[in-house]
Image: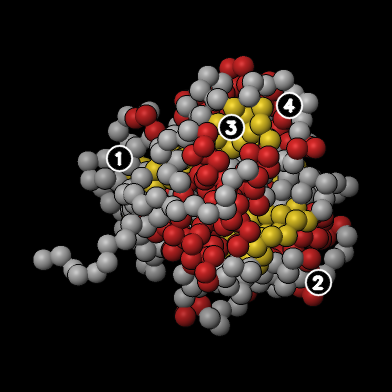
Amino acid sequence: MLGLMQDQPLLISSVLEHALKAHPHTEIASRMADGSVHHCTYADIGERAKQVANALVALGVQPGERIGTLAWNGYRHMELYFGVSGMGAVLHTINPRLFPEQIEFIANHAEDQYLLFDLSFAELVEQIAPRLKSVKAFIALCEREQMPAIDVPGLMCYEDLIAGHSNDFIWPEFDERTASSMCYTSGTTGNPKGVLYSHRSSILHSLALCTSDGFGLSAADSALLVVPMFHVNAWGMPYAAAMCGAKLVLPGAALDGESLYTLMRDEQVTLALGVPTVWMMLQQHVETQALQPATELCLNRVVIGGAAAPRIQVDTFETRFNARVLHAWGMTEMSPLGTICNPLPKHRDAPLEAVLDLQAKQGRALFGVSMKIVDEQGAELPRDGKASGLLLVKGPWIASQYYGGEGGQILDSEGWLDTGDIATIDTDGYMQITDRAKDVIKSGGEWISSIDLENAAVSHPAVAEAAVIGIAHPKWQERPLLVVVLKPGRTASKDDLLTVLQSRVAKWWLPDDVAFVEALPHTATGKLQKMKLREQFRDFRFQT
Ligand code: ADP
């Protein structure tokens, strides 16, 4: 017997319509290329998203066709999030930090019909345009007088394009499983692969973000999205914020410590989301300028994800910013959120050290994400906080396959997706990543966690960033090498660093050597690029 409830598809257009009725006056602040801050409201975004939808219809865009963007976080990108998906097309956000050849590959593979771009990518667009086979026109996200002088076929001006269209649009109703947006994985090995999100998956995922043990998002929040809108829908925040009426603060291209700090202060940011590398820059700015974030800002939560949150970074947010860190884990294939680290009642009165230990964990699964750890034969391992194994996930906002069937079957026979991460899960359900399976260091038949060593190394006050890689060893198979970037003007010796590590990790984990470098290689999404680092140190040998 079916239930007798109304059968309404979960569509992204309904999120926007809700925002228009429930919190039309809530602001969206966007930092523009000239440093000024543009303010508009959900009502403005709604009207302009409808103009976008009308413009796309007039251009002949059909449901399901892909519309590419090369854009920073800003209000126009937000209009596209709702206008493109709302009218039934697929918003394909492209990571502009990728190599031009990768961008070409991705836009061609997705068969993007139009490409909308911020002016800072005008030259890039001019360079790649001749090889983008499916793109019918390139639309610059600017006013007429700002149009770039570039030579690309069918160059159009966004403001001109939408100005001619009505801000009235009846959103079509369709199957909630219809594709809404897509994002390609960085493709550290092989070609990038497309993850195709649906209206249903995006809405379920956003609802989970809003919950108290998610990001606890509400109309009282002013949320700074340092996470880019060109990667995994900015962790779903544009939809979640529109659902609950949180103000959005969109930083554009300026992600340096000073710009972020100023935005946080001026836009009264309560919640900020980003990867560890951007928080490293923010905290360095606060340190060098001797700022007082606990009194100057009203920040109360910082979400750190995309890579393991270093303990010292968490400590600094807790003690200097008076902001609680929400450590989160996920991946492009998971929309992206899988786990969030929130304390349980039993942790309420825990001392800071214990809180920091807890926050080193990636957290507990949100409802909607099932996870388990397995050994190399696929047998499930106990949830005792000790056994570590391959982390598998399944759920309604997790990919079932890649776009175009690339990479073949990605789920096992029971529907589990292998995350490629190695983790433990404790009796309370807290998951902790020890490594990427491909980065794990195997020494004498045991595993050494590079993440734990990196975490310990950055707790030294002179260390800006650290990476640990395995180097071949005649006796132990592999031994860890610590590669360190020091903060400007600071010094530390190999012995200083090993002394710090000694107090935090097992003796046999201690790196056999330390190398000092000017910078570490990062991927386009801000993760340490261990493969490149291993290449860089290919000829390195330990002096034994
Ligand atoms: P890419 O597109 O570069 O693959 P993803 O965002 O999909 O980027 O990367 C997902 C991976 O990032 C995860 O499988 C995990 O290895 C790593 N990751 C994400 N969040 C965390 C975290 N909080 N701690 C440790 N690793 C993380």
Q: Nearer the viewer, mark 4 or mark 3?
A: 3
Which residue in the protein does label 4 denote? 123
Which residue in the protein does label 2 denote? 296
Q: Quadrant of the N terminus?
A: bottom left
The amino acid beneath tag 2 is Glu
Kindly tell me whether residue 534 is visible in this rendering.
Answer: no
Are the residues at dot 2 and dot 3 in contact (C-beta closer than 8 Å)? Answer: no
Compared to 520, does 32 lie above or below? below
Mark found first going from the N terminus, 4 or 3: 3
Which residue in the protein does label 3 denote? 115
- Horizontal side of 268 relative to 227 (left or right) equals right
Image quadrant of residue 282? bottom right
Q: Nearer the viewer, mark 4 or mark 2?
A: 4
Q: Nearer the viewer, residue 239 or 159?
A: 159
Which residue in the protein does label 1 denote? 411
Are the residues at dot 4 and dot 3 in contact (C-beta closer than 8 Å)? Answer: no
Q: Nearer the viewer, residue 484 or 81?
A: 81
Mark found first going from the N terminus, 2 or 3: 3
Name which residue lies at 63% across and 68% down.
26
The amino acid beneath tag 1 is Leu
Q: CA distance from mark 2 to mark 1?
A: 48 Å
Q: Quadrant of the C terminus?
A: top right
Mark found first going from the N terminus, 4 or 2: 4
Compared to 176, does 341 lie above or below? below
Are the residues at dot 4 and dot 2 in contact (C-beta closer than 8 Å)? Answer: no
Name which residue lies at 28% across and 51% down.
380
- Horizontal side of 30 relative to 86 (left or right) equals right
Alpha-carbon neighbours of circle 2 within 10 Å: few (<14), some, or many (≥20)? some
Name which residue lies at 58% across and 17% down.
131
Are the residues at dot 2 and dot 1 in contact (C-beta closer than 8 Å)? Answer: no
Residue 174 percent across, percent down from the top left: 34, 49
Alpha-carbon neighbours of circle 1 within 10 Å: few (<14), some, or many (≥20)? some
